[in-house]
Image (spheres, coloured by chain):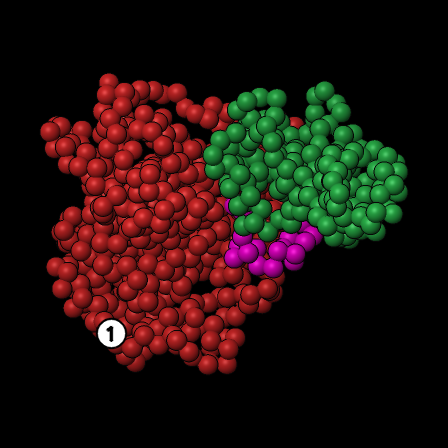
Chain colours: A green, B red
Amino acid sequence: MISSQEEVIINVLVDHKPGVLHKVSNLFRRRAFNISNVAIGTSEKDQVARMTLTMRGGEADAIQLVKHLENLVDVIKAEIVDAGKAVVRELALVKLAPKPEDRLQILSFVDVYRARIVHLSDDSIIVEASGDSDKVNAFIELSRGFGLKEAARTGITALSRETRSNGSQENGVGW
Amino acid sequence: MEMSGANALVEALRREKTQVIFGLPGGQIMPVYDALYRMRDLPAEQRIRHVLARHEQTAAHMADGYARAIGRVGVCISTSGPGATNLVTGIATAFMDSSPIVAITGQVGRRFIGKDAFQETDIIGVATSVTKYTFQPRKASEIPQTVKAAFHIASTRRPGPVLIDLPRDVQQEAEVMEFTDRIIPKRYSPLPDPDPETVLRMVDALANAKAPIILAGGGVKISEASQELVALAELLMCPVATSLMGKGSIPEDHPLSVGVMGMHGSSETNQLVAKADVLLVVGSRLSDRTTGNASKFCANNSILHIDTDKAEIGKNKVPTISLASDAKKALKAIHAGLSTRLGEGRELDPFRRAKDELNLEGLKKDGPYLSAVRVVRLLRKLLPRETILTTEVGQNQMWCAVHFQAYGPRQFITSGGLGTMGFGFPAALGAKVACPSAPVVDIAGDGSFAMTENALATSVEERIPVTVVILNNRMLGMVAQWHRMFYGRRYFGVELGKSPCFPKLAEAYGAVGVEVRDYKELGNAVKDALISEVTTVIDVPISPEENATPMLAPGAGLEEVAIA
């Protein structure tokens, strides 16, 4: 999982319609960009979906990817997220099957990570944890000592703290 | 107004001023063909001509050749499944060379999509990587808008192919149609004017340059910026090299033209580029065939890069100054800035091509073969200035790139990016349909011509007369050349033998076939072909040993010594 290359987060606003995910994901594949995470959901507008991509590679690769993305007709806007000036979050669900004697300790580490127990039964616990990727990674690593069975992650999503983002403009330039 | 999707398609095509479509029917596109049939009720000048291909690949190449010859969107059409996949090579060819075509494919009915129905192919999935955009209208009423947007996307900014996949029942469905000039997506708009500050920086760099040179790419032709290119070169008094795609953007008999650079460019031209202090690149993506080894390319000089596609800037080579702009606007702006800066008295650093002393009387052949280089140079002398030349791919293409001077931007048509063998002949047919009064000649290799020779039927039946000159070495010549140069002459899979006899093949299709044995016969055959009302195939025996040189070894830098 750990790569020597840096990770760059790219936010992409796309038309919310069938086939767009294919066109965008096809671009990474065909131009051999190394995408480690994709999170997609709706945005503040009904017709617009937001994709948050995490790319392994340098700044130059990321700039090139943004240019290719903006060439896609369905892409409204693509920009590199400055992680220092953004809120970056990921959510993980972790299913544990702990030994009975560990149950109490789980409660305490869940508390430390500000995670939540969302399901509890005789033989399993599901914990919801969110935060930046480092925190989620650490949480999952810790869970291994407590009977980790399954983990599911949403992938990173991010919003710039600034009200007006700089960088790339609307898809007015390209092709 | 209520009408079927198929009728709406035809009406929308007519509104885009489509005059011809190249295609081949099949089950899932039949409603559209029926709508084409119904056009016979219209006055002749309002009908769309349909040119029947014998293989969908040739239909796509014809549409592409048409588009390149005239600068308008070419349209091709096929059925679903194999018809659609056969188009793909042609679509990919147009994509790599930024040629505006709209490809229309039939598709199985909506309720069969995804069920692996007969002749179903997910052509959107297949074609996404080789198109600028794809559409699949799910309602007939979407068709007018879709066609409008498809033509707009195909022909603007950096042009390219757009695919419209039409489920059969959408073609049949009758709905109320609204024909409008409104284009969706609205945000897809022309580029803004060139940024004045960047223009000024480029002007500074060029004004201070001691030995500038311009590299013109295919973008100069697409943007119809030849005049502006020549004006800027004359102002700077600097040489103009072109990429293969840019060939003809400056008339190659202009004193400042130094021809095509790159892997097969002349050593003098490549040296000029390598030694220039400032290289102005206009509308070229700096492909590996143009730059040679990219890391060695212009390592010590400044590169000023203008391209309408900002994703091309920095993709293959990071420039010193870049400008995302239409070539014509950028060249105009730079010219305006420079003309106040440069005084009179700039002199042309003479780059004079050895005068072509070739004369028909003096040509003798060596042994049983004619020389390909001489044939190509002789053809340039024999063919009228306004001739549109197409080439196939391989040695024939490189011989033409080096030895057939192009005098105009739409007069040299070749598959540069994809390198599609079999492109030249159907592209010639498309070019002839676009420009019926211009002589159209395809200089071919025997391997390439054989790939799409069935377009002879189209050429004869549709009365589209062109001239094909086959440089016949009975080899896949370029591969054989690589065998000789880099694989110790270990020929494998390159010897084509004597089959077919091309003149007889041409005759079988109802075309004229001529085998020539010397230069004089070639001259006579070309003269006859130019006035013939049917296509002429001229078979010219050349040596299997003749190389297309000069050639830089793959991975070599521009300044390195070429294989002569």
**SS label for mark 1:** loop
Q: Of residues B346 and A175, which is closer to you in this image? A: A175
Identify residue for label 1: B499
Depicted B408 relative to depicted B453: above or below: above
Depicted B242 relative to depicted B185: above or below: below
B465 lies left or right of B448: left
How many marks can you see?
Answer: 1
Depicted A30 relative to depicted B445: above or below: above
Q: Please report the residue visible at 56 percent of the width from the left and 49 percent of the height from the top.
A: A29
> Residue reaching furthest front?
A122
The residue stretch that appears in magenta: B284-307
Q: Position of residue A39 (x, y in %)?
A: 64, 37
Q: Is residue B305 magenta?
A: yes
Q: Is residue B100 visible?
A: no
Q: Please report the residue visible at 68 percent of the width from the left and 43 percent of the height from the top.
A: A152
Q: Please report the residue visible at 55 percent of the width from the left and 31 percent of the height from the top.
A: A14
Q: Position of residue B127 (x, y in %)?
A: 42, 46
Residue A104, picture quadrant: top right
Q: Is residue B446 visible?
A: yes
Q: Of residues B424 and A84, which is closer to you in this image? A: A84
Residue B12, picture quadrant: top left
Q: Is residue B2 magenta?
A: no
Mark 1 crowd level (few <14, some 14–19, many ≥20, 10 Å Cα):
few
Q: Position of residue B108 (x, y in %)?
A: 30, 43
The three-letter code of the residue at mark 1 reads: Ser
Subunit bearing disc 1: B
Residue A64, picture quadrant: top right
Q: Position of residue A131 (x, y in %)?
A: 78, 35
